[in-house]
Amino acid sequence: MIGIRISKATIVACLGSLGSILCGLLVVGLFLLLAGRNPINIYSGIFASAFGDNFAISETLVAATPVMFCALAVAVAGRVGLMNIGVEGQLLAGAIGSTFVALAMPETTPAWLMLSLMCISGCLCGALWSAIPAVLKVGLNVNETIVSLLLNYVAVLVLEFLIHGPWQDPTNVSWPQTQAFPACAELLHMPESRLHLGFFIAVVIGIALAILLAKTAIGFRANVIGANPEAAKYAHYKVNRYLIAAMLVSGAVAALAGFSQVSAIEGRLRSGISPGYGYTGFLVCWLARQNPIAIIFTSVLLGGFLSGADNLQLTEKLPFATVNILEGAIFLFLLGSESSLKRLAEKMQLRLPSKNVTSPPEPTPTQPVNLETSEAGA
């Protein structure tokens, strides 16, 4: 009989994430109570509109798809110690690249070819967008967090220029958007549902990343670089190459969110295709402790919040920003729990799962570090 062993460190980390969510719900509930609203009715309404029936579940999965892509993108960069907050801009870059192909190719193009070219073009644009902070980090040691964050706003301006200028639909100049995509540029959907192939692609990528990071030499080296880059350099790992590669892959995965949005949901490029999926993905990645499998389930949970926000506007007359406030409260408690978990881990002598490998010992001239031997054993 095969048993499943869960370490104490994993349990502590899970309790920290769960506690952050509960505390966020409690604080927002108190504010709703002070405003004369019943938080129990509001939360139950969100749950019912997110998971109450098959249609609600499908809409939740639709909302979870771009969040999942963005969270996985953050996790890829985070495993080598990089903080990629630019996934929102990389999502928009992917949407722009996919739109270019959809508008440039003839309508008679076979669907498999059109969608393949849109996906490739979007991923290339997202990877190139993420290459900017990666190159600046490796070449000039510029903080990738600030650069990637600022590039989000540049991506928004580029998108606005295109939909107000050369790509604007000439038949409807009052709306800043492109022409509708041809039928061959539409991603496959489930019957009688908006749930599309992008969700299943995101799940497959999450599972593949989990296997890559846990079971391969590439994943082992990436974890070592994230845990102790100095030891990785001493072991002659090509650290800079891994940093650039991780950011390129991160940008490409985030771009898939943009591709799926314009191809499966919007059917065109327009302003506001992302209400902040990149930032929500960052929160999901932190809640999941950069674990790709946990990201899949956490994305569905946060997708339920986003899907349930429509119910707040229709039934409770509350603005969509209520969900943003809830996400912000969860994130604040999550930040606070980090230091508490570290102190608790030190007392219990635990290794939290945010780092997948133990930092190798400091190298000395008489004690060379042979990480390859450890890698072979892993």
Image: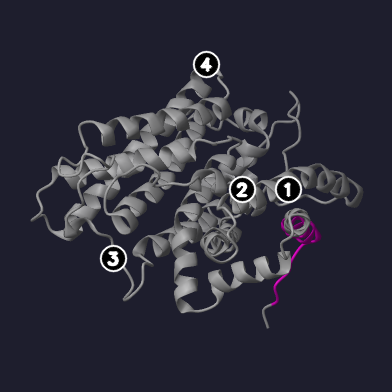
For marks 4 and 1, the one nearer the N-term is 4
Q: Which mark's residue is nearer the viewer, 4 or 2?
A: 2
- Give, as a three-letter code, the residue at label 3: Leu
How far apart marks 4 and 2 lie (CA) works out to: 28 Å
In the image, residue 142 sits, relative to residue 348, either above or below, namely above
Nearest to the observer: residue 61 or residue 218: 61
Question: Which residue position holds label 2?
Answer: 283
Q: Which mark is residue 140?
A: 4
Q: Position of residue 177 (x, y in %)?
A: 27, 42
The magenta span reads 3-21
Residue at 79% x, 43% y is 336
The image quadrant where one finds the N terminus is bottom right
Residue at 35% x, 64% y is 197
Report if residue 55 lies within the magenta region: no
Question: Which residue position holds label 3?
Answer: 188
Packing grade of label 3 (10 A; few <14, some 14-19, many >=20) is some
For marks 2 and 3, the one nearer the N-term is 3
- Kindly state the secondary structure of the residue where label 1 is placed: helix
